[in-house]
Image: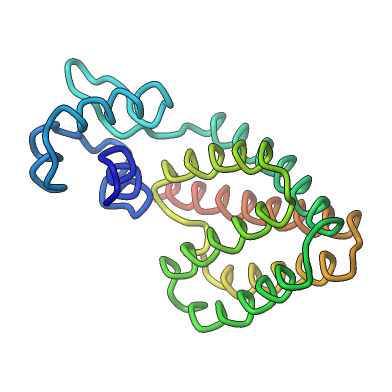
Amino acid sequence: MKDAYSLILAAIEAGTYRPGDRLVESELAERFGVSRTPVREALQRLETQAMLVRDGRSLIVASLDHNQLAELYTVRAELEALAARLAARHATPEEVRVLAQMVADDQRAVRDPEALARANKRFHHQIHLASHNRYLVQQLDLVHRTMALMAKTSLAAEGRGETALAEHKRIVDAIAAGDGAAADRALRQHISMAWETRLKLEAAVDRD
């Protein structure tokens, strides 16, 4: 059984709790069927990780402003590109086949942004693992955990699902070819397009 921290974090990542939502200790304990002590400890841990922030005496799910998003995407691009470059060098044939199969399977979710977002997370995590660098994987886990604070996936934008999967295929092709430079470029382009798409989504909200 998952601990309270994992349960709450998973709920934030799934969008059950969104930026600005207040987390109440007693309600969380009841929802997850655990005592209040581990919930309290989990909330404190999430606060130290900046996943939660204080609002008076309450804790709410944090939100990311424009500058924080820009900083996050900058760091993500560097770390993800490094993971792709290392994967091109170290990935086993089995890992490459798994990545290729993921791209093929994810075509079924192309019209479902939420399902595609979950598939996208699995795909990127598989690249992280294929880098065979535990310290890089740890840092990327932190980046992707913070990304859960984004209220909406960029994959919800019109046409983004199809282009994202095409970008995934280029990344996998470069890794399969053992071309670290190409894998680096393809991954950077992928993150750049995701950031550009998110900027457009933000601009559309501002116009509304």
Q: Which residue shows up at 25% across the image and 39% down it?
A: 4
Q: Which residue shows up at 45% across the image and 34% down it?
A: 64
Instruction: Name the spot of residue 45 as percent of width and height, x first.
Output: 35, 26
Indicate whether 170 appears above or below 30.
below
**Relative side of 153 to 183, left or right:** left
- Give the residue at the far top of this rendering: 56
Instruction: Name the spot of residue 138 as percent of width and height, x first.
Output: 59, 38
Q: Which residue shows up at 60% across the image and 63% down it?
A: 123
- Give the residue at the far front of this rendering: 1
Residue 129: quadrant of the picture = bottom right
Instruction: Name the spot of residue 172 as percent of width and height, x first.
Output: 76, 69
Residue closest to the eye, 148 or 152: 148
Residue closest to the eye, 203 or 121: 121
**Relative side of 72 to 17, left or right:** right
Residue closest to the eye, 198 or 19: 19
Instruction: Name the spot of residue 176 as percent of width and height, x first.
Output: 83, 70
**Relative side of 47 to 166, left or right:** left
Q: Which residue shows up at 16% across the image and 27% down it?
A: 37
Q: What number of labels is visible? A: 0
Residue 149: quadrant of the picture = top left
Indicate whether 175 appears above or below 181.
below
